[in-house]
Image: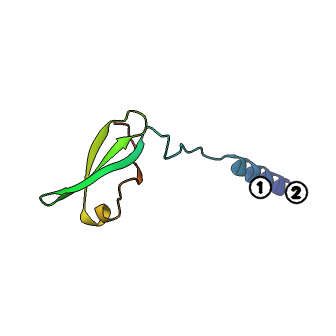
Amino acid sequence: MKTKTILLGLALALMSCEKEYESVTTSCECGTIANDGISGNSYWIEVRNNCTSNKKRFYMDQDLWMNAHVGDKRCYGYEW
C-alpha cells in the first residue's frame, strides 16, 4: 500500500509539471525568413528577429536551404 501511494504521488507530480514554451511567433530567439540566396558555393537565409526587427544572415548547406522558405519561422537559441 505504501509503495502504491508513493507511485501515485510521483505520477501526479510528474503529470502536473509542464514545461512552458514561448511561441515561435513571440520569442526573441526566433524570427521570420525575409530573404534567401546563394553566394558562390554558400547558401544563406536572412531572418528578421521577432523582438528587435534586426536581420541576420545564416549560412547552411543546400539540403537545409532547400527546405527554408521566405515567410517560415526559425529559432536559433539566442537573440540577435
Asked if one can make out residue 27 in the rendered structure from this viewpoint, the answer is: yes
Q: Is residue 13 left or right of residue 52?
A: right
Q: Tell me the distance, in whole angstroms, between the alpha carbons under discs 2 and 1.
A: 10 Å
Number of numbered discs visible in the structure rendering: 2
Q: Which residue lies at the image location 81% right of the left edge and 56% below the top edge?
A: 3
Residue marked by disc 2 = 1
Residue at 65% over, 47% down:
18
Q: Amino acid at mark 1?
A: Leu
Single out the mark in the foreground, 2 or 1: 1
Mark drawn on residue 7: 1
Q: Quadrant of residue 51?
A: top left
Along the line of sight, the residue nearer the viewer: 44 or 70? 70
Question: What residue do we see at 80% from left, 54% from top?
Answer: 8
Q: Is residue 20 left or right of residue 49?
A: right
At x 42% / y 41%, what residue is drawn?
Answer: 29
Tag 2, which secondary structure?
Answer: loop
**Quick one: which residue is furthest to the right in this view?**
1
Q: Position of residue 66 (x, y in %)?
A: 30, 65
Specify the quadrant of the image occupied by residue 50: top left
Q: Quadrant of the N terminus?
A: bottom right
Instruction: Kindly tell me whether residue 44 is visible in this rendering.
Output: no
